[in-house]
Structures are given as structure tokens and as C-alpha cells.
């Protein structure tokens, strides 16, 4: 009886140890979902450019563009996250996220609260790492940045 109990105890212990070790290794090796999305997206872009035989100059320009558009190497769609929320809650999120910064910008200091909220509703957050270019020379600007 003791041998059978010891055998099952060892099997259960070894199984638990293997499961725990696998999960911890997976967590350590896994990057964020946004970074994984970015890496997958860049792989698809590179594959398309290779398939279409784009010249190296165009390939580099495209990759530099995406590196400047997503400087934190994350692809997060804020609209898809906040879009389904009720309008009132979205307005509160926008006000919480952007209004304090907007009130400090001299260009917007004479605007009414409603106008500021409308401008804030058009804004989106972009995460930028230190010492990262947000735009490149010879590239047409697409955005207005508030830092």
C-alpha cells in the first residue's frame, strides 16, 4: 500500500512540477500582446515586399515608416477598446486622458470646455520611447503631436 501511495505521489508531484515549470518558462519568454502583434505585422509587411520584389530602398523606407509610427513596437487600437463603450463613459475617458494636457497648451486656453472635449475626442495616445524620432525628414506629416 505504501509503495502504491508513494508511486502516485511521485507521479502527481512530477506532473505538477512539469506544469509549473512550463508555465513559468512561457510567461518569461512571452512578450506583450501588442508587441507580438507588431512583430507579426512587420513580418507580414516584409513578406509582402519580398513577394513583390520591392527594391531595398523602398523596403527600408516602409520599415522606417512603421518604426516611426509605432515607436514603442506596440499595436494597440484604442478605438476598438473604447468604441463599444457608452458615449457618456467614452467622454469621461477622453476628458480624463487628454483634458489636463489640453488645458496647459496656450493655443487652447481660450476655448470652452465643450470645444476642448470635442478636440480631445479626436485625439489618440501614442507611446514613444526616449530618444525616438516621431517623424522623419522627407516624409509628409500625418499628425499633430502634443508632447
Image (spheres, rainbow, N blue to C red):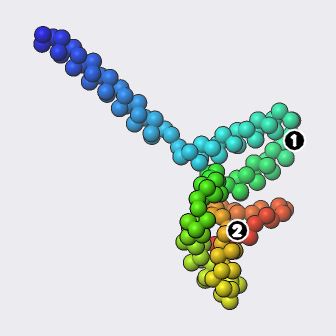
Q: Image check: 37 left or right of 51?
A: left
Q: Which of the pair 56/54 is nearer the observer?
A: 54
* Mark 1 crowd level (few <14, some 14–19, many ≥20, 10 Å Cα): few
The image's mark for residue 122 is 2
The reply to whether residue 72 is visible in this rendering is no
Is label 2 in a helix, a strand or a loop?
Answer: loop
- Residue 130 higher or lower than 4, as above or below: below
Q: Which of the pair 41/95 is nearer the observer?
A: 95
Q: Image check: 17 left or right of 44?
A: left
Is label 1 in a helix, a strand or a loop?
Answer: loop
The image's mark for residue 55 is 1
Q: Which of the pair 41/113 is nearer the observer?
A: 113
Give coordinates of residue 87: x percent, y percent: 61, 65
- Looking at the rendering, in which quadrant would you find the N terminus? top left
Q: Which residue does the image show at 69% across and 42% down from the upper left?
A: 41
Figure quadrant of residue 117: bottom right
Amino acid at each position: 500500500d505504501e509503495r502504491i501511495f508513494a508511486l502516485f505521489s511521485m507521479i502527481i508531484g512530477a506532473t505538477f512540477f512539469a506544469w509549473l515549470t512550463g508555465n513559468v518558462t512561457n510567461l518569461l519568454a512571452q512578450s506583450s500582446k501588442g508587441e507580438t502583434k507588431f512583430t507579426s505585422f512587420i513580418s507580414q509587411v516584409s513578406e509582402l515586399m519580398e513577394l513583390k520584389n520591392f527594391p531595398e530602398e523602398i523596403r527600408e523606407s516602409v520599415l522606417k515608416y512603421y518604426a516611426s509610427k509605432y515607436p514603442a513596437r506596440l499595436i494597440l487600437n484604442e478605438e476598438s477598446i473604447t468604441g463599444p463603450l457608452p458615449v457618456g463613459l467614452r467622454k469621461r475617458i477622453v476628458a480624463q486622458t487628454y483634458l489636463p494636457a489640453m488645458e496647459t497648451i496656450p493655443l487652447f486656453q481660450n476655448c470652452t470646455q465643450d470645444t476642448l472635449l470635442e478636440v480631445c475626442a479626436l485625439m489618440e495616445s501614442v507611446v514613444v520611447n526616449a530618444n525616438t524620432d516621431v517623424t522623419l525628414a522627407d516624409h509628409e506629416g500625418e499628425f499633430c503631436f502634443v508632447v
